[in-house]
Amino acid sequence: MLNSLQKEIINLKNEKNGIILGHNYQPKEIQEISDFIGDSLELCIKASEVEDSDLIIFCGVDFMAETAAILNSDKKVLIPDYGAECPMAHMLNAMDVLKAKTMHPNAEVALYVNTLAEAKAEADILVTSSNAVKVVESLDSDQILFGPDNNLASYVDKRTDKEIIVIPDGGYCYVHKMFNVGDVIFKKEMYPNAEVLIHPEADMEVQNMADAILSTGGMISHIKNSKNKEFIIGTEVDLITRINREFPDKIAIPLLDDGICRTMKLNSLDKVKKTIFNEEFQVNVDSEIAKRSLRAIERMIDVSTTK
Ligand code: 13P
Ligand code: SF4
């Protein structure tokens, strides 16, 4: 049952012909008012298909909203709080990419979607945690410049014969870095029948203990199709909110109770209402940078949607 504020937001959004896109890490009250919830790739694809809406309200973090804005230069894309930044996306700037390109002129550049537009503009293609291996394998070069996440880079490196060169050495997600081997052992002892699902942003020794290494959207599909009942979830805690909403007969246990992405939680209902009402906190991207980064985004969507 939606509360009165949630109903008000939905009415307001409908009056303005808007659409609310929410990432899997959004808190329950935001998930409940979202028209679409997904992982980074699913949200990119959805954002490329919203011709009928005039307003996009993006409940996630900065790089996701920026990507939606690049895909929709004719629409207003709003983010309820400008402070909702992904720290990892700020670890790689355009200059780092340009320097790496000078050092490796024959390499193709595959950047994690968790980057700012200025870096995306220097990429040949983007990857997300759900398609990284497929995207890298689709490239012609045997040398791939990859950034910013070291752990996703190692995950890809294990699954391709191409040479993965990480730029810069040190990009990481502080949330997934919290997980350690002891956490997995502890939860496995408590729930011996549970399958362990780990996000590829986690450290390699934690990934090595997983039954499956998946993006957040991949975890949702896996749980949907699995006969298993219990799952230890090695990613941000609010993915469990989505699992509980959609699969009430399954049991999802957080690998760590305080695996919380703080900036994802800045998008409160009050802020969403204010953003839509005032049409404020628009996401603006320099038109030249948007044009150049659009190529890399569209190329990734093409590779991901082709069988
Ligand atoms: P997903 O694409 O798996 O949702 O990951 C996004 C993210 O920010 C992980 O921390
Ligand atoms: Fe960024 Fe990590 Fe938060 Fe994902 S969980 S948005 S990578 S800080």
Image (tube, grey):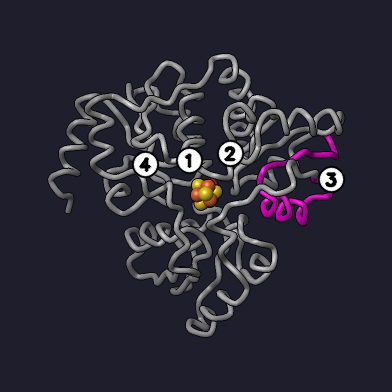
> Mark 2 = which residue?
90
Residue at the location (69% across, 40% down)?
Answer: 135
Q: Earlier in the sequence, mark 1 or mark 2?
A: 1
Amino acid at circle 1: Glu
Q: Where is residue 260 in the image (x, y as percent from the top left)?
A: 44, 58
156 falls in the magenta region: yes
Distance in Å between CA atoms under marks 2 and 4: 26 Å
Q: Identity of the amino acid at label 2?
A: His
Position of the N terminus, as image quadrant, is bottom left
Neighbourhood count class around disc 2 (C-alpha, 10 Å): few under 14, some 14–19, many 20 upward: some
Residue 141 located left or right of residue 278: right
In the image shown, does 4 or 274 lie closer to the viewer?
Answer: 274
Residue 85, numbered label: 1
Task: Please report whichever mark, 2 or 4, sits nearer to the chain's N-terminal start.
Answer: 4
The foreground one among 238 and 304 is 238
- Mark 4 = which residue? 36
Label 1–label 2 contact, CB within 8 A: yes
- Report the mark closest to the observer, 4 or 1: 1
Q: Residue furthest left?
A: 4
Q: Give the range drawn in magenta.
A: 140-164
Q: Where is residue 93 in the image (x, y as percent from the top left)?
A: 65, 32
* C-alpha gap between disc 3 and disc 1: 30 Å
State the image quarter where residue 97 is shown.
top right
Disc 3 element: strand
- Up/down of 119 relative to 169, above or below: above
Q: Which amino acid does label 4 sit on?
A: Phe
Few, some or many residues within 10 Å of mark 4 (<14, 14–19, 20+): some
